[in-house]
Image (cartoon, helix red, strand yellow):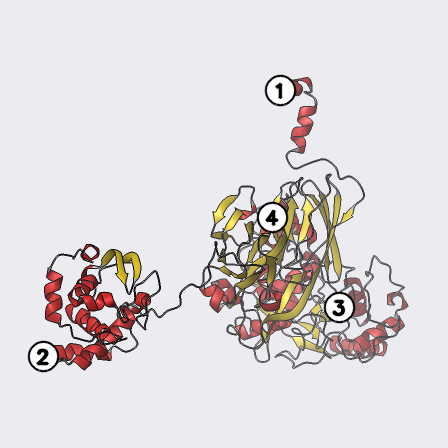
Amino acid sequence: MRKFVVAAALALPLLAPAADKAGPGDFGPPRGAPVHAVLTSPPNVPPPITRDYPARVIVELEVQEKEMPISEGVSYTFWTFGGTTPGSFIRVRQGDTVEFHLKNSPDSKMPHNIDLHGVTGPGGGAASSFTAPGHESKFTFKALNEGIYVYHCATAPVGMHIANGMYGLILVEPPKGLPKVDHEYYVMQGDFYTAGKYREKGRQAFDMEKAIDERPTYVLFNGAEGSLTGDRALKANVNETVRLFVGNGGPNLVSSFHVIGAIFDEVRFEGGTNAQKNVQTTLIPAGGAAIATFRTRVPGSYVMVDHSIFRAFNKGALAILKVDGAEDKTIYSGKELDSVYLGDRAGPNLNAVATATASAERGTLSLEEQIKAGEALFSGTCSVCHQANGAGLPGVFPPLAKSDFLAADVKRAQGIVLHGLSGKVTVNGSDYNSVMPPMTQLNDDEVANILTYVLNSWGNPGGRVLADEVRKRRAEAAPVAAAAH
Amino acid sequence: MHPRRLAAALGLALSGLAQAADYASLPGGRFDSALPQGDAPDAVVTVGVAPFALRRTPVTVAEYARFVETHPEWRRGAVPALLADARYLVGWRGPLEPPPGAAARPVVDVSWFAARAFCESEGARLPTWLEWEYAAAADETRTDARADPAWRRRILGWYERPGSAALPDVGGPPDVHGVSDLHGVVWEWVEDFNALFISGDSRTQGDPDRARFCGAGAIGLLDRENYAVLMRVAFLSSLGAADTAGTLGFRCARAQPGVSP
């Protein structure tokens, strides 16, 4: 095969320079009748291109300046490509000749233009598309490089035009298309700078100073808080493939794009040709984009965030993908255990412990005080496994309530708390074979109080453990508990 | 005859044509433009603005209607496409029928050629960019309020409102010169709009090749903070002389009596 190629090249020396001149991605002049590009509003993506030849594709995009909600009860004057932020999604095939018509609505105040990152040529089309209100510009380019590209307005002041929402995505599909998926969605992040505070009601003006200082009021997916949540959440079923075209218009911030609870099977990072597999969070530069693909496995709501996380919870960078379908408990169980975990010292009321400690120092510690202190400590340390009612979990954590194992040997119980227990034990007729770690963080007083509480609760025989006993136990070697039983 | 009297007589004669337009006198003086005025594109060169007179308000629909009555060549349908695009007076019901209720609003959807012809008809001309910028630097109490963020915010407030809303009547609060509506109502044609070379791609202003194409009038913006002005320049530079827009009107200027224009 290789030899054949060499031979062919030698045999056709006159054709080679022509092919070189055309270069990669240039499949020659457009063929067939001109095609009008299907444009879609976010979060929708135009259908895949089934054509197998390069065509002349006509794109007609209208710039509209319009007031729209940016958050509940907050409106903002967006400058848009096609009436939405981000602008209409454009889909062409590599090698297509794109005839671009940029129309500026007669109602516009401003002149606008467009710089498409998918264009090879100075300014990406900007200088050729500078358009006054009520006018139209046309320029033509050949889509030489495949990939996902940002487009944006580049009219002075550029930052303000972008901050007002003038950006979108253009997909240049490879000649054979992208692998088939069940859903394709269009999500684009942008940062916004309003004169008022986050969620301050009413009409909000653009704030140039905040924009220059890069202090956004809002960081949003698809131009408004709530644009992709609730009824407008993205949707999929379990065991489907989802492809997200994720762009970042900026103007300032870089996005750490993450879907909580999902792992991207594949990311074409920076919109390029290389794919990274098994990605948790992908970085999307301002003026950049990525294609993230994953398979849904478990139903539920998947929250998309900029993992620069204050932006998600305090500036609006939240979107939802809602996955419907049957649970698969082998992949994700749902909640198996719901119990209080207070941490070692984080009990809601450790007054009882403090009282017991003070009494112990004075030598006046009563049984009552020990039980009270023990109860507080038990709920912070022991109840996670043995449960607040001492019942344990069948087959996993042995019960302490009416425990024959405890009643049989209280000294042994002290040793277990201090040194831990590993291996099989039989409690109330059931076998338990797991590990309890040594509770070395507890001091002698605390161990004594906990055991005293346990002995005096849940039908146990009662009794009292004193700190001195525990101190002696601690000095002894770990007991061979299982063997002794 | 004393030149002033001559001018007064001339003014009276003209008023018969297009009712007496009200002009304010502006003293002119030393002025720092936001656009480069010298040979070096990145140095502020203070220039002199000669005294001139400027219409107190933009030309209204009623005034323009009287103009097309007496100048049939400027009626919609009669104007060659070379001098005004297809949107020329697009909101009018007929060539002599302005939209109802719009009499006191600024006339819009007029080309640069049309605006010039109107001003000529009242013995005036369009202001230069420098004159316009100098006049627009004022607020109610100062001749140059540009350093005040409030001045800038007021301008930007207008930029941010979409152009689809009905225009207000002319005659807002006058500034220190007695001129109204320079900001917040419409864009306005200037005589030399075509020399405002801002690239359609605003990011190439630093291109060293620039001077080769644009010559002495080439612009970079000297005070990038003053983007409120930049946006007006950007708007004007997006236009051709036959273009019209629904937010674009004009007002006229003329030399002060006794001062050569």
Callouts 3 and 4 in the same chain: no
- Mark 2 in CB contact with mark 1 (< 8 angstroms): no
Mark toward the start of the polypeptide (2 vs 1): 1
Numbered mark located on residue A6 in the image: 1
Q: Position of residue A89 (x, y in %)?
A: 66, 55
Mark toward the start of the polypeptide (2 vs 4): 4
Work out whether residue A254 can be spotted. Answer: no
Q: Position of residue A69 (x, y in %)?
A: 61, 71
Depicted B123 relative to depicted A278: above or below = below
Q: Nearer the viewer, residue A472 or B84?
A: A472
Numbered mark located on residue A363 in the image: 2
Chain identifier of the residue bearing label 4 in the image:
A
Numbered mark located on residue B246 in the image: 3
Q: Position of residue A197 (x, y in %)?
A: 50, 74
Q: Nearer the viewer, residue A278 or B183?
A: A278
Location of residue A27 by image quarter: top right
Chain identifier of the residue bearing label 2 in the image:
A
Mark toward the start of the polypeptide (4 vs 1): 1
Q: Which residue is mark 4?
A: A148
- Residue shown at 53% from the left, 43% from the top: A275
Identify the amino acid type marked 1.
Val
| Label 3 vs label 1, nearer the camera | 1
Could you give the CA–CA distance between mark 3 and mark 4, rounded to whole angstroms? 36 Å
- The residue carrying pointer 2 sits among few (fewer than 14), some (14 to 19) or many (20 or more) residues within 10 Å by Cα, namely few
In the rendered image, the quadrant that contains the N terminus of chain A is top right
